[in-house]
Amino acid sequence: MSTYQEVFENNRKWVEENTQRDPDFFRRLADHQDPDFLFIGCADSRVPANEIMGLDPGDVFVHRNVANLVVNTDINAQSVIQYGVANLDVKHIIVCGHYGCGGVAAAMQPADLGLLNGWLREIRDVYRLHQKELDAIKDTDARYRRLIELNVQEQCVNVIKTAVVQKTYLRTGHPTVHGWVYDISNGLLRDLEIPFGKILERIQEIYRLEAT
Ligand code: CO
């Protein structure tokens, strides 16, 4: 762990290293950004988007919150999706959950968590949608892991429900939406391979926001 002052020393070293490696590094970044990926992940300090993807500054547009939720009335997440798709023209949107997620663990407890109740209810809603499957898993840890995966899947569905994603995809063939889970115990990413095309078709039966 670094002290407060060390952060600024780290920063100067990082600037030096990058400038030595590539003298145009910061000049190029100052000019514009052109990321192919929008990453929606958990605020957990152990899930640093760029690092786990091995990508540089400028490569990933990032939104993070507790338990990687995409809520219809959350103007923050919705604005990130709108800007990422309409202005930055990202090719892939990733919802990335992680095993060991404290937000999902909290939602599995029958406790009043004050201000967090409304936020974590989104995860309890995921549980309700998949209650049959989840209740059938007797091992608590296995059930917890499955809820983390199903939460990612449902948040992908929420991304696909947005008008900007539906309209842009039908016009241009992108962005594609992916669900990932990051394993904090070994650093590996897992692609849940959610059936994007099928979900989009099903979503459009009910949530179509593109005039025909
Ligand atoms: Co988390």
Image: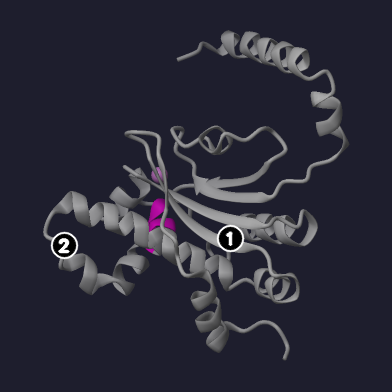
Residue 109 seen from this side: no
Q: Residue at x 75, y 70 (%)?
A: 172
Give the quarter of the figure containing the C terminus: bottom right
User: Disc 1 on helix, strand or loop?
Assistant: loop
* Residue beneath disc 1: 74
Q: Is residue 33 left or right of residue 104?
A: right
User: Disc 2 on helix, strand or loop?
Assistant: loop
For this orientation, the residue located farthest to the bottom is: 212
* Residue beneath disc 2: 137
Question: Residue 169 appears at what percent x and percent y?
Answer: 68, 71
Question: Residue 157 appears at what percent x and percent y?
Answer: 50, 69
- State the extent of the magenta-drawn residues as a range: 116-121
Pointers 2 and 1 in contact (C-beta within 8 Å): no
By secondary structure, the bulk of the magenta-drawn segment is best described as: helix
Q: Residue at x 52, y 35 (%)?
A: 48
Q: Residue at x 47, y 37 (%)?
A: 47
